[in-house]
Image (tube, helix red, strand yellow):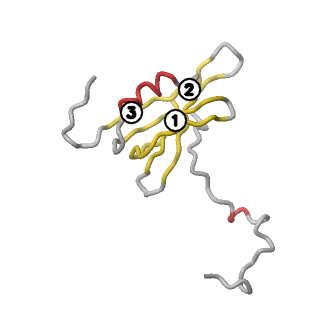
Amino acid sequence: MTDFDDANFDDVWDDDSTKPQSNWFAFEKVGDNVSGIFIEMFEKEGSFGPQHVYVLKLKNGEETNVALKDTTHKVQIGQLKRALIGDVIAFRFKELVDTGKGNKAKSIEIRIRPKATGEVREE
C-alpha cells in the first residue's frame, strides 16, 4: 500500500502515462485484425444503435472487446451464432463499402476455429 506522503497527486491529469489503455478494439484502417479465444458476448446500446460485443482473450492474456453494429453487421452477427465459448474467433477489416448514404461502412470478415472437443456441430 502506498503511503499518502509518497503519493504524487499533483500531475496525474497532465501525465498521459496515467491514462488506462482502452480494452475496445478499433478497426482504424483496412487490414486491422484481432483474434483470440471467445469468452463472452453481450448486447449493448452504442452511440450509433444496438451492438453485439464479443469479448476475446488475447494470446498475451489480456481481454479485448469487439463491437459489431446490429444494422451494418447482420451477416457477421449471424455467422458468430455458431461460435461457442472457447472457440478462437478472428475479425478483420476487409474494406470500406459505399452505403449510398454518404458514409462508408467497414466490411468485417469473420473466422471461427472450434476448440478441439470432438463435439459435432450442426450446419
Of mark 1 and mark 2, the one earlier in the sequence is: 1
Q: Which mark is residue 23?
A: none
Q: Disc 1 marks which residue?
A: 31
- Residue 69 occupies which quadrant of the picture? top right
> What is the three-letter code of the residue carrying label 3?
Arg
Q: CA distance from mark 3 to mark 2?
A: 18 Å
**Residue at the image point whose x is 51% and y is 29% from the top:** 108
Q: Identify residue type, mark 1.
A: Gly
Q: Position of residue 75 (x, y in %)?
A: 47, 22
Residue 13 position in % (x across, y down): 78, 64
Q: Name the front one of labels 3 and 1.
A: 3
Q: Which residue is mark 3?
A: 111
Of 94 and 80, nearer the camera is 80
Cβ atoms under marks 3 and 1 closer than 8 Å = no
Which residue is identified by label 2? 70
> What is the crowding at mark 3: few (fewer than 14 residues within 10 Å), some, or many (at least 20)?
some
The residue closer to the viewer here, 3 or 100, is: 3
Residue 73 place in picture, x, y as percent: 53, 25
Secondary structure under tag 1 reads: loop
Work out whether residue 55 or residue 15 is closer to the camera in this orientation and state it.
Answer: 55
Q: Nearer the viewer, mark 3 or mark 2?
A: 2
Q: Where 76 falls versus 56 (above or below)?
A: above
Of labels 3 and 1, earlier in sequence is 1
Looking at the rendering, in which quadrant would you find the N terminus? bottom right
Residue 14 is left or right of residue 43, and the answer is right
What amino acid type is highlighted by mark number 2?
Asp
Spatial CA span between label 1 and label 2: 22 Å
Element carrying mark 2: loop
Picture quarter containing residue 88? top left
Q: Are marks 3 and 2 in contact (CB under 8 Å)?
A: no
